[in-house]
Image: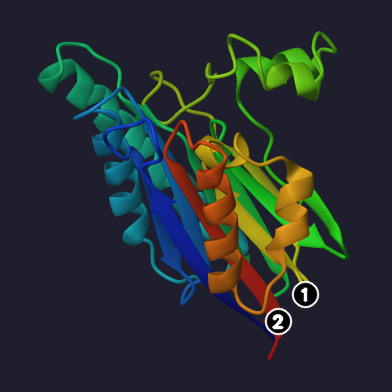
Amino acid sequence: MLTWTSAEATDVGAKRKINEDNMLSRPDIGLWVVADGMGGHAAGDVASQELVKAMTQLKASPDLADFVDAIEDKLLAVNYQLRKHGQEALGGRTLGTTVVSLFLLDTMGACVWAGDSRAYLYRDGELTRISHDHSAVQEMIDAGMITHEQAAYHPHRNVITRAVGGSESLYPDVRVFTVKAGDWYILCSDGFYNELNEDVIAAHLVQKTPQESVAILMEKALANGALDNVTLIIIKVEEQ
């Protein structure tokens, strides 16, 4: 039987006036969510809050597929609400949010996401990305037009191609995987991974507790400048 502990933190960063990131940690039902809002004050923060509020309504489930369906249903409902709110209250302005969610059910896990907030797995000394960014630069990387190094400085690096509230239709991506004792998982907004490369994340991730890991990695991200809001959740999996 696998069990998990988690810790989380969010910071407005050095440049932004408001924090448009929101997060949810529900280790009791094996669910964690990071949402990075966009649209500025009274839009981005509202969008990420609405998404997290909807995800808090999810109930524990003994079936992975059913729970993934429930996550997707919530995302589609929030997408509709945000489009409606933008039209009715914000004069047609678009408000949206990225989402990356992780659901663990014993030895199985699922990641559901839209946008460029990320999920990582650290297993056997190696950090790998579970999610795949919905962004302009990721599409250029996939097409072989630019390298990962060039993407970090590309003028379109902040352009995302999918978001909750971003368009009438929403197509979240889903990835299902096996979970093992000794796994560490990270969910984070782009304000975190833009400040720390994956080698640095991997080098400092494994500590005695997720709380220590979060404290160290957040401190390093803020020390690097933190041009955006910084949010991360770390989950540690153990054998009971």
In the rendered structure, which amino acid carries the disc numbered 1? Gly
The earlier-in-sequence mark between 2 and 1 is: 1
Q: Residue at position x 59%, y 61% from top?
A: 216
Tell me the SS state at disc 2.
Answer: strand
Mark 2 is surrounded, within 10 Å at the Cα level, by few (under 14), some (14 to 19) or many (20 or more) other residues, namely some
The answer to whether residue 33 of the structure is visible from this angle is yes
Q: Residue at position x 36%, y 42% from top?
A: 12
Q: Nearer the viewer, residue 190 or 216?
A: 216
Give the colouring mode of the picture.
rainbow
Q: CA distance from mark 2 to mark 1?
A: 6 Å
- Residue 185: image location, x then y, percent: 66, 60
In the image, residue 217 sits, relative to residue 16, either above or below, namely below
From the viewer's perspective, tell me whether residue 146 is left or right of residue 52: right
Q: Which residue is mark 2?
A: 238
Of all residues, the one furthest to the left in this rendering is 89
Q: Nearer the viewer, residue 170 or 141?
A: 141
For the C terminus, the quadrant is: bottom right
Q: Are marks 2 and 1 in contact (CB under 8 Å)?
A: yes
Q: Which residue is mark 1?
A: 182
